[in-house]
Image (spheres, rainbow, N blue to C red):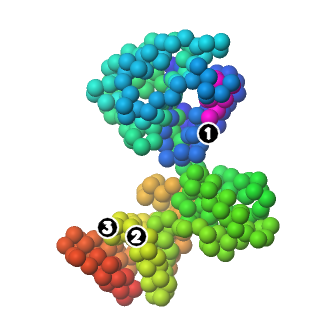
């Protein structure tokens, strides 16, 4: 019976299965790392449809307007001049109460010549594991979750792609690029191309990266937290202005800043109790080593009491934003409170 593959090794195990010719009949692909997920789909196509996706033995459907009758018709269509057919279905709610019983029946009787691949992107993959029928469906499929890669793998991947673009980059600057982009490969791929085209030297510098890469809201929030704790008031004001320039909703800004302060408090508590970086990552659902390292470095410059005051100040501002017509003014006031605290 198919099993759920380890999160970390999803793409590796899928690649190994394809190379060994051990491709099953039913797959469910999901997770935030779209780059690897889409690479997996491309590998399915190359293996099952070597003549290309224009062949008779390839079908792709978008789930929003798809009926189960159409899925059954595709599944029951015999391959032509080939051993198997590939059917891709994107963002179809297999686990909805309206679909799951019939889908279980379809999955239970898939012919050997079919490779049926469900991919989740805009539709959230979150089946209720308590429901018996959902467990039955998942038991019939090979479910692969494509997660954000750890920092070590990302740094190697970034360095390899810069090399392919005719440029070099240090591990430290590769980690910086991963940090300010959020660490997703799809984003990194386009940013690597941009930086490589911009740089005029063989070795890409941090200056090159910062000149052309727009940091994520999360990355700027880390920088702001660092500036606040270091009492670098001018830098903090510049970073707050940078957040305003992103034109994000004020509630999203305060959420991001508040989250960083809460994570900072957790990091300080970890230091107080001699807990590890891994403990902090699990406690705060932090994806990357370098994000946790950044928090621990900032937390080491302050006290539990000081950071707690900043967390409370963020909470007060978040409440005030619900009733103010001047959200930017409230955010500036928050910055003053944090600086004075």
Q: Is residue 105 above or below residue 248?
A: above
Q: Which residues are magenta?
A: 42-50
Residue 44 location in percent, x, y?
61, 29
- Dot in front, 2 or 3: 2
Q: Residues within 10 Å of mark 3 (few under 14, many from 20)?
A: some
- Which numbered circle lies on residue 39? 1
Residue 157 location in percent, x, y?
68, 52
Residue 11 location in percent, x, y?
61, 38
The answer to whether residue 253 of the structure is visible from this angle is: yes
Instruction: Determine the residue positioned at 53% across, 59% down.
Output: 182
Q: Earlier in the sequence, mark 1 or mark 2?
A: 1
- Which is nearer the eye, 295 or 30? 30
Q: Residues within 10 Å of mark 2 (few under 14, many from 20)?
A: few
CA distance separating discs 3 and 1: 35 Å
46 part of magenta stretch:
yes
Residue 52, picture quadrant: top right
Residue 270 location in percent, x, y?
46, 65
- Circle 2 is placed at which residue position? 247
- Which numbered circle lies on residue 251? 3
Q: Is residue 165 above or below residue 126?
A: below
Q: Secondary structure at mark 3?
A: helix
Q: Is residue 270 left or right of residue 38?
A: left
Total marks drawn?
A: 3
């Amino acid at each position: 019976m198919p099993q759920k593959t380890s999160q970390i090794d999803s793409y590796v195990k899928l690649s190994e299965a394809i190379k060994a010719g051990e491709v099953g009949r039913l797959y469910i692909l999901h997770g935030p790392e779209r780059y690897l997920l889409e690479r997996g789909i491309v590998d399915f196509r190359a293996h099952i449809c070597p003549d290309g996706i224009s062949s008779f033995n390839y079908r792709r459907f978008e789930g929003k307007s798809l009926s189960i009758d159409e899925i059954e018709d595709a599944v029951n269509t015999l391959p032509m001049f080939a051993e198997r057919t590939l059917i891709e279905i994107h963002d179809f709610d297999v686990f909805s109460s309206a679909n799951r019983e019939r889908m279980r029946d379809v999955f239970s009787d898939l012919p050997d010549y079919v490779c049926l691949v469900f991919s989740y992107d805009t539709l959230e993959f979150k089946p209720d594991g308590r429901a018996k029928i959902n467990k039955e469906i998942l038991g019939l499929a090979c479910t692969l979750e494509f997660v954000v890669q750890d920092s070590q793998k990302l740094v190697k991947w970034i360095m390899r792609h810069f090399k392919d673009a005719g440029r070099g980059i240090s591990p430290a600057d590769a980690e910086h690029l991963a940090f300010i982009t959020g660490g997703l490969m799809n984003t990194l791929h386009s940013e690597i191309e941009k930086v490589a085209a911009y740089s005029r030297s063989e070795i890409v510098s941090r200056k090159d990266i910062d000149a052309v890469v727009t940091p994520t809201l999360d990355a700027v929030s880390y920088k702001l937290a660092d500036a606040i704790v270091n009492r670098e008031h001018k830098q903090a004001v510049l970073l707050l202005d940078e957040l305003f320039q992103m034109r994000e909703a004020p509630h999203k800004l305060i959420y991001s800043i508040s989250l960083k302060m809460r994570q900072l408090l957790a990091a300080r508590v970890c230091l107080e109790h001699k807990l590890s970086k891994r403990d902090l990552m699990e406690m705060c659902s932090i994806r990357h080593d370098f994000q946790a390292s950044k928090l621990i470095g900032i937390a080491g410059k302050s006290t539990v009491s000081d950071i707690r005051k900043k967390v409370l100040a963020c909470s007060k501002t978040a409440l005030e934003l619900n009733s103010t017509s001047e959200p930017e003014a409230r955010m500036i006031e928050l910055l003053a409170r944090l600086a004075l605290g």
